[in-house]
Image: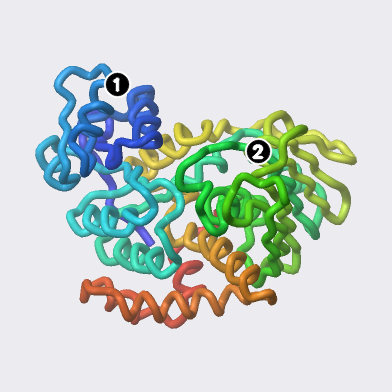
Amino acid sequence: MSFRLIDSEGPLRLIVVGAGGMGRAWARTIQADPDAELVGIADLYPEAAESAAAETGIPGLAVGADALELAQRTGADAIVNATIPEAHHPVTTAALLAGLPVLGEKPVAASVAEGLSLAAAAEHTGQLFMVSQSRRYHRSLHEAKQRLGTLGAVGIVAVDFFKAPKFGGFRDAMASPLLLDMAIHQFDMARFLLDADPVSVSCEEYNPAWSWYAGDAAATAVFAMEGGARFVYNGSWCSPGHETSWNGSWRISAERGTVLWDGDGEPSTDPDEAVAALADPGREIAGSLREFISALRHGTEPMGRVHANVMSLAMVESATQSASQGRRVAIDDVLDRSYEAALATERNAEVLAVMTSWTSVRDALSQRSRSE
């Protein structure tokens, strides 16, 4: 499925929506990219937008409370949606319907149902909506995947994630802080490594006695993936000492060998074999931005296109449901329930028509996105 390209001269003109910490990080990243130009910052709170604009050092940078009005006023080519997850759906929908492509922060939306609505809105408008799964953009992750190509069938992908951040604020009060706020990164990285989507999951959540989180801050999940491989996630957000990388510590077991990656340095393979040099995918959100611009200029398929990305959020919802229900959960059951919810709540007739044309959610998502 193609999307509309942008053939304007000069750097891609972008506004950032959301002036919090991530919005300010995006503003800095846009400023550092010669192929992008920051032309405005929007936020519901004018003082936040003004403060973020002042930090950029750009004289007279446009600000406003209404993202679409600001985009029109500045002649923006696209928006970067760095709002809170609950605002992802309304902000992205409005931009797509106004003819603006969107690069959005993860997760795609606050729920899989909203993610399906956004996939349908992107289809209806022909605009690109790409989700920034920023931890895919790490050269060593891509090298680990390349090394798997010499080792035959992959049977097990396992990641340990052990950190002890003391954020304060909303995460400390969440019911499932690890699964809802962080695990999507490793879930999405596993999909990338395997080139496969999830089939089912069994998950248990728990909270160590010393945890400073109100909700369960540790979890173990086993996903059955397409093709028969298993993805095993073992993580905690309250484990001080010998902490892993924010990317996690990975072991990938295949038919003829194993790849290890500590999440930061170079991956290693046993038995070791030479691999060809890789193109640098960029690093974190800078890599996302570069790929978004390339897609809009040249029509190249980005990794985080909405149709492909919904499955990463489906892994999170399925894991939390498995933990709360104490049973194995089929991903298709979650997709089907989310589809019914999306149909029931969609208010745009054209977007609804796109969703009703889908014969199955999994087929709609896979057929409308190329292999990642």
Q: Is residue 37 visible?
A: yes
**Which numbered disc covers residue 344?**
none
- Is disc 1 placed on a helix, strand or loop? helix
Q: How many marks?
A: 2
Residue at 51% x, 41% y: name it: 134
Colouring scheme applied when the structure was drawn = rainbow
Residue at 54% x, 66% y: name it: 317
Q: Is residue 13 visible?
A: no
The residue under label 1 is which amino acid type? Glu
Residue at 27% x, 66% y: name it: 124
Q: Is residue 124 left or right of residue 220?
A: left
Q: Position of residue 194 (x, y in %)?
A: 67, 56
Q: Is residue 177 left or right of residue 95?
A: right
> Is label 2 or label 1 in front?
2
- Quadrant where the image shows the N terminus: bottom left
Which residue was labeled with disc 1? 55
Q: Position of residue 60 (x, y in %)?
A: 14, 21
- Is disc 2 placed on a helix, strand or loop? loop
- Quadrant where the image shows the C terminus: bottom right
The residue under label 2 is which amino acid type? Ala
Q: Position of residue 300 (x, y in %)?
A: 42, 47
Which residue was labeled with disc 2? 164
